[in-house]
Amino acid sequence: MRRRKPLERRSELKAKKPWTRKVPLADPERPTAELVELENGMTLRRMPLAPRSAKQTALYVARRLLVRRLLEERPWCEIQWDDRCQGRSVDADEIVLRSQGGSILDEANLQTACRACHDAKHAHPNAAEARGVYRRGTHGEAA
Ligand SMILES: [Zn+2]
């Protein structure tokens, strides 16, 4: 019986192409759902809040610098509600609320206030409007 000559390799042995992943691993930066235990014993899967956008960050940086400057330039409470006024301003307050479309960066919409007057203004929107320290904006009701 005739034996066939063994097959011969036609090409050199060479290293295999490195294995590549076809489906990428989950992005480690990507937020994943977290489990939140409720008081009644149930568990919720909830996505964490998205990080603040660059645009929003820039807005708040500008706001912080503006508030710091305004409190230096206008150190005395501009609301002066009544004798509860503490004198020194510690807050920058929007005349038209940001929830009602007021700008938080427009100096013309800002007044400096002590905490007591600031609180009184927000607690009594009608009286505040009559005193000119509050104007209703375009969105919704007074907060
Ligand atoms: Zn005050």
Image (tube, rainbow, N blue to C red):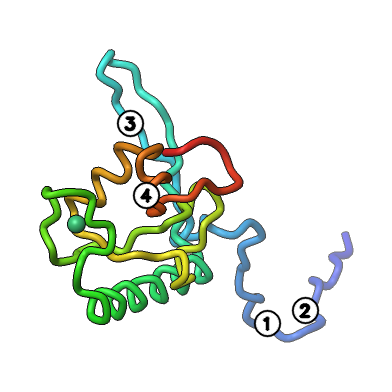
**Residue 89 on image: x %, y %:** 19, 65
Q: Is residue 97 left or right of residue 85?
A: right
Q: Which residue is mark 2?
A: 9
The extreme bottom residue here reads 12
Indicate the amino acid at tag 4.
Arg
Binning the other alpha carbons within 10 Å of mark 1 as few (below 14), some (14 to 19) or many (20 upward) gives few
Q: Which residue is mark 4?
A: 131
Residue at 68% in and 82% down: 13
Residue 119 sits above or below residue 19 on the image? above
SS under mark 4: helix
- Of label 1 and label 4, which has the lower sequence position? 1
**Residue 111 on image: x %, y %:** 35, 64
Q: Which residue is mark 1?
A: 13
**Residue 44 on image: x %, y %:** 40, 26
Q: Which residue is mark 3?
A: 36
Residue 42 sits above or below residue 53 on the image? above
User: How far apart are labels 3 and 2 at the CA level?
Assistant: 62 Å
Tell me whether the residue at label 1 lies in contact with that at label 3, contact meaning CB atoms closer than 8 angstroms: no
The part of the image, by quadrant, that contains residue 16 is bottom right
Indicate the amino acid at tag 3.
Val
Q: Nearer the viewer, mark 1 or mark 3?
A: 3
Q: Nearer the viewer, mark 1 or mark 2?
A: 1
Residue at 27% in and 15% down: 41
SS under mark 2: loop
Tell me whether the residue at label 1 lies in contact with that at label 2, contact meaning CB atoms closer than 8 angstroms: yes
Residue 80 sits above or below residue 62 on the image? above
Q: Is residue 56 left or right of residue 77?
A: right
